[in-house]
Image (cartoon, grey):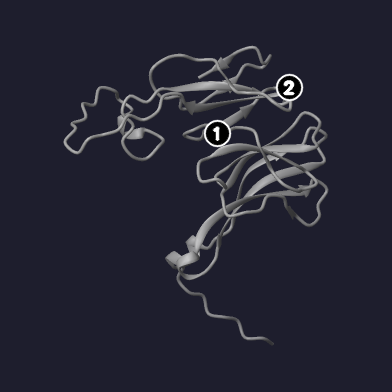
Amino acid sequence: MAATKAPRTMKQDDVIKTRYVCDATLSPDGKLVAYVLSEVTGTGEEERQQTAIYLVPVKGGKPRRLTQGKGNDSNPAFTADGQAIVFLSTRDKLPQIYRISISGGEAVPLTSMKQGAGPFEMSPDRKRIAFAATKASTPSRGKDDHVVVDRAWYRFDPMPGYLGDVQQAAFILPLDTKASEPTPVTDFAGIVSSIAWSPDGKRLAV
């Protein structure tokens, strides 16, 4: 009879190196699940947490890694025909929205926002996405500048560093055209922290 290893106390490294699944979403035909796998990759100074998107049949089978590269991929959503996935990625440093065929291949960028795009929400008909992004550029800050905080969410700004009077907007981007620019649909000072579509796809709550 094989000897059983004595139990040991869980350490910090065990927690850090735990692989976990999140952002699972079902394809329109109900046959595939796309999900994000987070795991530690690399060793030594190259060791880091990385996320990638995987596909697995609903009936079971071996998961297949769909996205590659050094960036972190998240927020997967199937297109209306179920043949592609739209997702958020930091592969080009700033987060942008991409599309990739479920067969694999090269991911195609859908946005090129100067300060990156935020997580998106797919419309009920899966033909459009809504996302938040910064409209105004960040003003330069001198060495002796003083910042007067006059908004309650100052400490919760979703971007690091000094932001000044940053203005964010909600944008809508159609997915059924090859060449299309995101259209801003809000115009107010402040941060857009979340977006939701109405069930009929005619309105946004921000």
Q: Which residue lies under the disc numbered 1?
A: 119
Horizontally, is 58 left or right of 197 in the view? right
Question: Measured from the top left, where is residue 125 in percent x and y?
Answer: 73, 22
Provide residue 196's location: percent of width, then percent of height: 57, 22
Drawn side of residue 152 relative to residue 22, left or right: left
Query: SS class of the residue under badge 1?
Result: strand
Q: Quadrant of the N terminus?
A: bottom right
Location of residue 86 in the rendering, given as x and y in whole percent from the top left corner: 68, 36
Residue under circle 2?
125
Residue type of the residue flagged with mark 1:
Pro
Residue nearest the observer in this picture, 1 or 149: 149
Residue at 81% across, 31% down: 81
- Residues packed near mark 1 inside 10 Å, few (<14), some (14 to 19) or many (20 plus): many
Query: Residue at left 83%, top 48%?
Result: 59
Marks 2/1: CA–CA distance:
18 Å
From the viewer's side, name the closer residue of 33 and 183. 183
Q: Outermost residue toward the top? A: 202
